[in-house]
Image (cartoon, rainbow, N blue to C red):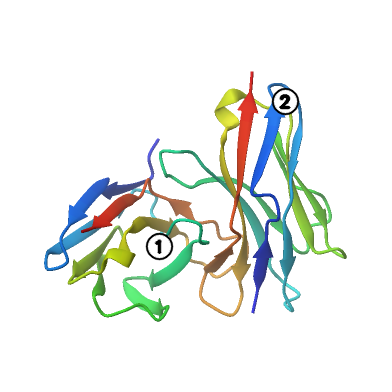
Amino acid sequence: ETGVTQTPRHLVMGMTNKKSLKCEQHLGHNAMYWYKQSAKKPLELMFVYSLEERVENNSVPSRFSPECPNSSHLFLHLHTLQPEDSALYLCASSQGVGASTDTQYFGPGTRLTVL
Amino acid sequence: AQKITQTQPGMFVQEKEAVTLDCTYDTSDQSYGLFWYKQPSSGEMIFLIYQGSYDEQNATEGRYSLNFQKARKSANLVISASQLGDSAMYFCAMRDETGFQKLVFGTGTRLLVSP
């Protein structure tokens, strides 16, 4: 069962393109997250949304623009990216109740290559 | 700031044997949560097991158990009766109580199970 889906799974774009990553969760969760996973680096949190409101922006460059229209959908809009932005972008969701037991469930990721 | 350390970049184990993946953490919080995730080559991060800092018993989930030694700040994952499908990257993570729902990840351990 896939509780969190991401599209597209693979994306190749030029530095001048504009594209969007989409994440959808079917778990009834209230919080959604974007993470970046670069080669040989730990996962880095980019953005957190709780009840469609952004609650954390982890010093991410403005060329990444998140959007959360409702509690089930999360987008990451990309424009004028750099080659170093090539990475696996993972979306996650959780109940978001604030307890330490709150578990994040991840989607399959979008592998992004910037040429 | 919280930190997760995984000192084993790679581990090898034969099928049906048990293996321990190491994880140490650093935090000044009294209440925290520790997680293990599995990431196959497909990219999806799969939640395996959770341990709360106040839990007196070690967590277990099927073939996975967490050897939690609070005084030593370690939370090692034990996989019993390894299977070929266990070959993947394994990440230890801690819930950051200073940020909303934020997970701090280690650099991961690549496990290879041989027949």
Residue at which label 1 appears? A36
Amino acid type at circle 1 is: Lys
Chain for numbered disc 2: B
How crowded pointer 1 is (Cα within 10 Å; few <14, some 14-19, many 20+) is rated as many
Q: Is residue B80 left or right of residue B99?
A: right
* Image location of residue B51, percent across then percent down: 71, 55
Residue most toward the left? Answer: A17
Quadrant that contains the C terminus of chain B: top right
Residue most toward the right? Answer: B71
Disc 2 and disc 1: Cα gap in Å?
A: 32 Å
Residue at which label 2 appears? B81
Tell which of B28 and B30 is nearer to you: B28
Quadrant that contains the N terminus of chain B: bottom right
* Image location of residue A8, percent across then percent down: 23, 48
What secondary structure is found at the residue carrying circle 2?
A: loop
- Which residue is at a point 69% across and 68% down the rendered structure image? B32
Chain for numbered disc 1: A
* Image location of residue B71, percent across then percent down: 87, 65
Amino acid type at circle 2 is: Ala
- Which residue is at a point 76% across and 75% down the rendered structure image? B30
Q: Is residue A75 left or right of residue B67?
A: left
Is residue A54 among the parts visible in the rendering? yes
Which dot, 2 or 1, sits closer to the camera?
1
Q: Are marks 2 and 1 on the same chain?
A: no
What secondary structure is found at the residue carrying circle 1?
A: strand
Image disc number at residue B57: none
Is residue A30 among the parts visible in the rendering? no
The quarter of the displayed image where residue A16 is located: bottom left
* Labels 2 & 1 near each other (Cβ < 8 A): no
